[in-house]
Image: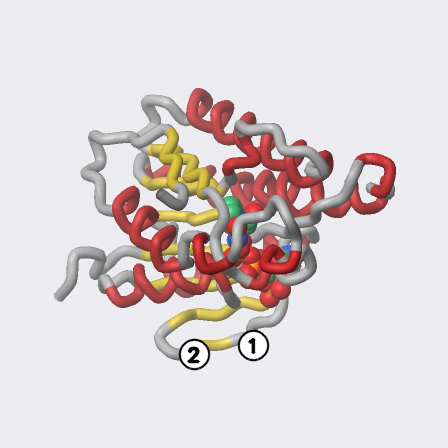
Amino acid sequence: MTQLSGKVIVVTGASRGIGLAVAVRLRDEGATVARLARTLRAGWHEGFLDLPCDLTQEQDVDHASGQIGGQLGTPDVVVSNAGAFMLAPLEETEPSDFDTQLAVNLRAPFLVARAFLPSMRREGRGLHISVGSISDHHAFPENAAYGASKFGLRGLHEILREEYRGSGVRCSLISPGPVDTRMWDRADPDATPGLMPRKDMLKPDDVAEAVAFLVTRPPHVEVDWLRIGPA
Ligand SMILES: NC(=O)c1ccc[n+]([C@@H]2O[C@H](COP(=O)([O-])OP(=O)(O)OC[C@H]3O[C@@H](n4cnc5c(N)ncnc54)[C@H](OP(=O)(O)O)[C@@H]3O)[C@@H](O)[C@H]2O)c1
């Protein structure tokens, strides 16, 4: 028996990186964890209910939320973590790049919230965690598409928090600084002046620990915004 036994938790973008570390941590604390990502294989694996799902597609999100509702019931916690990253000067950012960043980092979390929050409100309980970024409140050059999407996500979080105030459903935003995951592969920080070397970044487990902190607050405590970064 561990502190999250009996809890149903959904983690998006849990096939690797931060989402996988969060899913493992919460499963190891006793929760039943459903993982959503495009490259997962449907079914139960390593104690997870895996649902392959492109979160930019409304029908995929609705199908996954229906499967989770049918098999596990209303989630206690949703960790909206899936995301994609790009760095490029404005003049090299194609409109299609901008659309893609907004689709994955802002529209998909909107679809996820819309799929899960109504049943959580009906039950008068639950926690919705958005994984933002330092880029949701700090402006970096060459970050137009990603930064705009994450500033938007912070706005979405703040609106959800107001909309669900008093319902029993709590909303938290966690904004990590750089974390050493595959998200950085294309930018190649170890070879790019001005970017933090990978060895100095947070590890996915550091973010998982912070998410576990949010998940284990008692129901009368709402953490609005948690910022963490390398010391
Ligand atoms: N790494 C950092 O420095 C850092 C810092 C601050 C915030 N963050 C945020 O943390 C979150 C996770 O990032 P990460 O570093 O762990 O990146 P990652 O290793 O690249 O993982 C991204 C995850 O998102 C999933 N995903 C991407 N597009 C998806 C889609 N259309 N539908 C479903 N799943 C999708 C991927 O799964 P599939 O490919 O299997 O679909 C994968 O599981 C993101 O929101 C990111 O913005 C990261």
Residue 224 makes an appearance in the image: yes
Classify 41 as above or below 112: below
For disc 1, the neighbor class at 10 Å (few under 14, some 14 to 19, many from 20) is some
- Disc assigned to residue 45: 2
Tell me if label 2 and label 1 are in contact, CB under 8 Å: yes
Classify 155 as above or below 15: above
Residue at x-position 57% and y-position 43%: 109
Colouring used for the render = secondary structure
Residue at x-position 36% and y-position 59%: 205
Percent of width and height locating residue 186: 69, 60
Percent of width and height locating residue 196: 53, 49
Number of numbered discs visible in the structure rendering: 2
Amino acid type, mark 1: Arg
Residue 64 makes an appearance in the image: no
Classify 116 as above or below 164: below
Amino acid type, mark 2: His
Q: Is mark 1 within 8 Å of ligand 1?
A: no
Q: Secondary structure at mark 1?
A: loop
Residue at x-position 35% and y-position 33%: 170
Percent of width and height locating residue 72: 37, 61
Task: Look at mark 1 in the image and give the residue it sits on.
Answer: 41
In the image, 187: left or right of 216? right
Q: Secondary structure at mark 2?
A: strand
Q: Quadrant of ligand 1?
A: bottom right
